[in-house]
Each structure stands twice: as C-alpha cells, then as structure tokens.
Image (cartoon, helix red, strand yellow):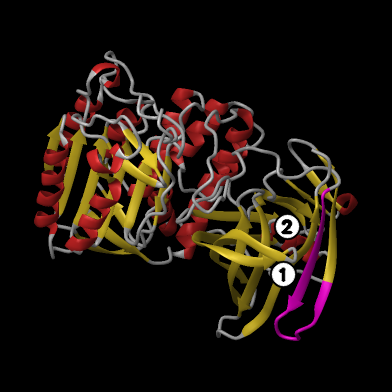
Amino acid sequence: MSLTLAARNALLLCFQQGNPMRISFRTQRSLFKAIAFAFALSALPVVAQAPMDIRIALVIGNSAYSGKASLTNPGNDARAMAHTLKQLGFTVIELRDGNKVQMREAIAKVQEGLKDKRGVGMLYYAGHGLQLDWRNYMIPVDAMLTNSTDVPNQSIDVNAVVEAFRAAGNRMNIVVLDACRDNPFVSFGSEKGLAPMDAPVGTFLAYATAPGNVASDGDSATGNGLYTQYLLEELQKPIAKIEDVFKRVRLNVRKSSEGRQIPWESTSLEDDFYFNTGQVIRAIKPDEKAMALAFDQEKADWDKIKSSRNTDELYAYLLKYPNGAIAEQVQFRIDQLQIAKVVPQPNKNGVKALPPGTNRYAKGDRFTIEVTDGLSKESRTLIARVTSADNETVVFNNGMIRTTQMGAVIENRFGLKNPPVLGTPADIALGKQWRAAFTNLRPDGVLENVYWDYKVTALEDVEALGRSVKAFKVQGSGFANFPGGRTMITTTFWIDPSTMFQVKGERLFRSATGAIVEYESSVTLHYSPGPR
C-alpha cells in the first residue's frame, strides 16, 4: 500500500539538494579487531548480566493415544529434551503419556516451584494439539474427542500454562509447542495445526510449524520429530542465545523439509536468554566501532554470495549470521528460490500475511504519498510509479530509484548501495526484530555506513488510503557519523502484512546535542496496483 520506508526516503532525497547524512568510515586499529571477531561470531552486545538461578521446565510428551491417533516420537522427544535441559541447569518436571489429571497436576507443581522466585519457566510439549475458537489445546492420551464441546472439557488449554507462569510471577517464560502433528481430531470443525497467538508479556512462544499447518512426527529411524531433532542440536551448542537458537532451528527445519515445514515464533521478550548459561542479559547498544568491524566481516561474506541462486550457500550464510544486518535479505532470496509449502493463515483479527518470497511490486503500481515537514508544517505530494519490474529489480519513475522486490534500495542518485538499503523484513510477526546496515559510495567519493535496529511492537489500526488499515507498528533506531558531527535517527512506521508495504511512517533526526534537525512524516493517500 506504500513504498518501504527505505525506498520512500531515498525517493524523497531525490527531490532535495543534498544528502543530509555524510558518514565517514575510517580504518580501525587492530585493538578493535578482536572485539569485532567476538561480535561477529556470537552477535553479543556489551551487556550487564544477571544469573537466573531458578529455571524450571515442564516437559510433556504424549505418544500413546488410542488407535490411529498414536504417535511415534513425542515420548522420545520429551525424554531427550528433559535430559538436555537438565544438563543445561533446569529443574525438569517430566511427564510422558500423560492423562488430563496428570497434566494438570504437573502444571500446578511447576507453578508452585516457581512461585515468587522471579525465575524462568519453560513448557515443552510434544504430542497432539489442536485449535478451537482461537485457543490452542494440548491433548491428553485419555481424551476421547468426538465433537467440539469435548475439547475444552477433555484437553488442556495452553493458556492454562501461560497463566500459571504469570501467577508465579516469572521474569521470563518460554513456551515450545511441537504439537502440530496431523491428527484425527479435526472432523468436528477445528482447523489443522495451531492458532496464531501473540506472546504475552515476558514470553517467547515457539511453534514447530506455522499456525494452521502441520509438522512432521519423524519416524522410528530418526527417534525424534523433525523440529525437536534440530532444537536439541542447537540447545547443546556452546553459545545458545534464545533468538539465535530458534532462528537456526527454523532454517534447518525448512531446509530439511524443503519448505514443507517452517517453524514460527512470537516474542515479547525485552532481554536475551542464554540456555547454556541460564543468564538473562539486558542488552545495551553495542560499541559502534566493534559493530562496524563486525559488519565488515558479515558484508565480506555477503559479497561472495550476493548473486548466488544456490540455496545451500544462502542457508550456510544465515546459519552463520542468523541475526545479521543482511539476514533478512538473504532470507527473502531463499523465499524466492524455495517457495514455502506452508499456507499463511489469518489471525483472529482477519489479518493474513503475504506469502514469503512473493513479489511485492509490479509494473504499473502507483503510490501517492503525502509528506509533511514536522518543523515547518509544510506538506507536499509525491507520485511514485513502478515503470518496470522483474523478479530481481523494481524501477520507479523511469530510473529515479531501483529496489529489490523486497523493497530494499539498490540505487538512487546518491549511488549504489551494498547491500541494498533495507526497511521492510522478509516476513513479519509481533515481536520480530531485525538489523540492517549498508555502505554507500557516493559520487563525490564519500563512503557512508548506516546502522539500524528494528522491532515490531504492536498490531494497530492506522489511517491511510482514506480508511482504517490493520498494520504492524515497527520502531527503529539508527545512527550516522560524519565529519564534524553525529546524527541519531529514530523512526516509526506501519506495515500492512497483506502487502508488506508501509502505509504510514515518521522519522526524526537529532544532532549530537539532542537538538531536532529534521522531522518528517508520510502517509499513503492512494495506491493503485498494476496488473499481476
């Protein structure tokens, strides 16, 4: 419904006399190389650490359902997960082939163990699960479900565990549901798979596959379900940061299943959690010199594969840099080359995301954008037309700007970008975080480097296109250093998930003293699509 913020900003610059950001890039001393190497390997910022002594995990694996509902691996999955979490320092309450009473007792026991301890609570569940009326249920082995009214009476609502964690006063909660096996309990109106949920405050929520889709139970030869197999591998690595763990699991599951199964996460965590140490780490902004050198290493690897159509090379890159500044663009390339076989499902608000890897632009697309200077209060209207487009490149206004199909800016009148300037991610969900950075060699020879951090913070109704649009709110911050000064940049924009276009946005530039030097907002007044 609008250009990405990066594309729009670049277009706006085309109407200005000069570039407001002149950023010098100097060769750093060898002292910083060691720091940068550590950042590149682990993506760890400079942090304050706090140990979490109380970590209790409830691990449930239900296999022994009657008849055709029987499963092969959840019992094995639970056994292996319990063993691994114990090695990592968790107190584990393990239940295999649990009936409803046993499952409720186990939940109560975990709640009591965590009560008022400000600890970390974790639920790992493998077995049958289903959704009903936008709620997710774990199915005990003694459930006899013949109609929809049986589900709340004979099953365990996942929210019961989340509520138990909340009542205990946990500092952090982790919920992992390998509960999306195809099952025989869908004949009475429930959809396949699980319903999408927004992670409650302080919670990391992980599904073995995307909402509304089903996951592989594996076979007797593997001994574990596909998702749990890779989760166990990642948990046992020397550095097991929660975000990186689940991103790598998602990549490995997607690659192994050839896109038939793609895990899904939603998070509201403000802190990082490390499985290998049990620490919750409150991150602060990384050292900028170390960040620059780490990005140099990442970009050097990117330059080797930036034209690659080999998915093995792209997967290898993402496994090395799961949270890197170029990761979203590499993910979009994979999405283009290996079409996902999972089907995006609408959430309870009716919001349905654009399938990953879908071309976002077509020749003939036309955007009418109103831009307002927040300082002078003056407004102007810009027209952006897609004058040519293929799977690789989108051209606006006969060459004024070129982007990728993702909307990342490849080139404008200030020069080529390496990598392209990213504003909108490969996919979107509440809590999603990503980084972006780019280097630009201007025609006047100035080498610029810009760094951004983004986070999806809400799903809101915003006014655009003359109506109310349900869109994800994204908040971002970045910085630019240039000879004689420094600029801090903050931005807020809203992405329509059905198109992955930005429908509204604002950006604020502050000088080193904190003074506002530029404030600009924009809204899409009209969008007309070209032929698809």
Asked whether the beta carbons under mark 1 and mark 2 sit within 8 Å of each other, the answer is: yes
Choose between 167 and 370: the one closer to the eye: 167
| Residue 368 covered by magenta stretch | yes
Amino acid type, mark 1: Ser
Image x and y of residue 343, in percent? 54, 34
Assign a secondary structure to mark 2: loop
The residue at 35%/37% (across/down) is 148
Q: Pick whichever, 161 or 433, lies toward us.
A: 161
Q: Is the magenta stretch mostly helix, strand or loop?
A: strand
Secondary structure at badge 1 equals strand
Quadrant of the rendering where the N terminus is positioned: bottom right
Q: In this view, does 415 lie to the left or right of 153?
A: right
Residue toward you, 516 or 479? 516
Q: Which span of residues is magenta-colored?
A: 365-380
**Quarter of the image where one finds residue 103:** top left
Q: Is residue 469 magenta?
A: no
Res. 89 in view: no
Quarter of the figure with residue 476? bottom right
Horizontal side of 159 relative to 403 (left or right) equals left
Which residue lies at the image location 74% right of the left edge and 66% below the top edge?
Answer: 466
The answer to whether one can see residue 252 in this image is yes
Q: Name the residue under label 2.
A: 2
What residue does disc 1 label? Answer: 522
Q: Which mark is residue 146?
A: none
User: Is 151 displayed left or right of 335 in the figure?
Assistant: left
Which amino acid type corresponds to the residue marked 2 in the rendered image? Answer: Ser
Q: Residue at x 33, y 48 (%)?
A: 242
Q: Is residue 387 above or below residue 373?
A: above
Real-space CA distance between mark 1 and mark 2, rounded to the nearest whole angstrom? 10 Å
Where in the figure is residue 212, as x and y percent of width and height? Answer: 46, 37
Mark toward the start of the polypeptide (1 vs 2): 2
Using a 10 Å C-alpha cutoff, classify the residue at mark 2 as few (fewer than 14 neighbours), some (14 to 19) or many (20 or more).
many
